[in-house]
Image: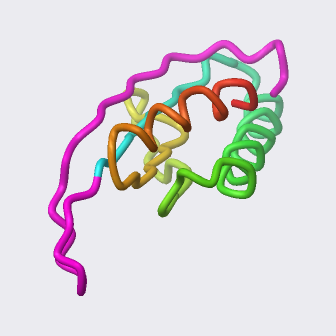
């Protein structure tokens, strides 16, 4: 990721009940990012790069069950720019992501 990027990050881990065929609990890791870049063109270039980098995580971290990367569509100043939502089957898988994913993202 670009070294110049300055951003706020908030993250939370929640347990959800998946109403699928297996009726299992899933651990959701939710990360919200907000760029502090003032130049809009530069900000969009950086956010595109970050989004691509995050999307590639599922190719390298096998502990990820499901992953979504979303971009903000709101014009509110308080809105975050990127949301990352990852599903894990348990805390062991989350910890694997934290080790492997942190070297990439």
Q: Nearer the viewer, residue 22 or 30?
A: 22
Would residue 80 be found to the left or right of residue 58 on screen? Answer: left
Above-or-below relation of 85 to 18: above
Q: Quarter of the image containing the N terminus? A: top right
Residue 69 image point, x, y percent = 56, 53
Residue 54 image point, x, y percent = 67, 44
Residue at 69%, 30% in the rendered image: 105
Q: Residue 9: within the magenta? A: yes
Residue 80 image point, x, y percent = 45, 34
Residue 18 image point, x, y percent = 21, 69
Give, as a single range, the part of the protein colored magenta.
Answer: 1-26
Residue at 54%, 51% in the rendered image: 63
Above-or-below relation of 65 to 102: below
Would residue 1 be found to the left or right of residue 92 on screen? Answer: right
Would residue 39 be found to the left or right of residue 89 on screen? Answer: right
Q: Nearer the viewer, residue 24 or 44?
A: 24
Q: Nearer the viewer, residue 34 or 27?
A: 27
Residue at 66%, 33% in the rendered image: 100
Above-or-below relation of 42 to 64: above
Q: Residue 19: within the magenta? A: yes
Above-or-below relation of 33 to 27: above
> In which image quadrant can residue 43 be found?
top right
Residue at 49%, 45% in the rendered image: 84
């Amino acid at each position: 990721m670009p070294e110049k990027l300055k951003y706020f990050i908030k993250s939370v881990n929640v347990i959800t009940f998946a109403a699928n065929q297996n009726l299992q609990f899933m651990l959701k890791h939710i990360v919200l990012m907000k760029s502090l870049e003032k130049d809009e063109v530069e900000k969009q270039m950086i956010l595109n790069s970050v989004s691509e980098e995050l999307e590639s995580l599922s190719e390298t971290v096998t502990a990820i069950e499901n992953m979504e990367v979303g971009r903000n569509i709101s014009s509110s100043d308080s809105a975050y720019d990127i949301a990352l939502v990852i599903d894990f089957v348990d805390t062991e898988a989350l910890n694997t992501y934290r080790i492997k994913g942190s070297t990439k993202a």
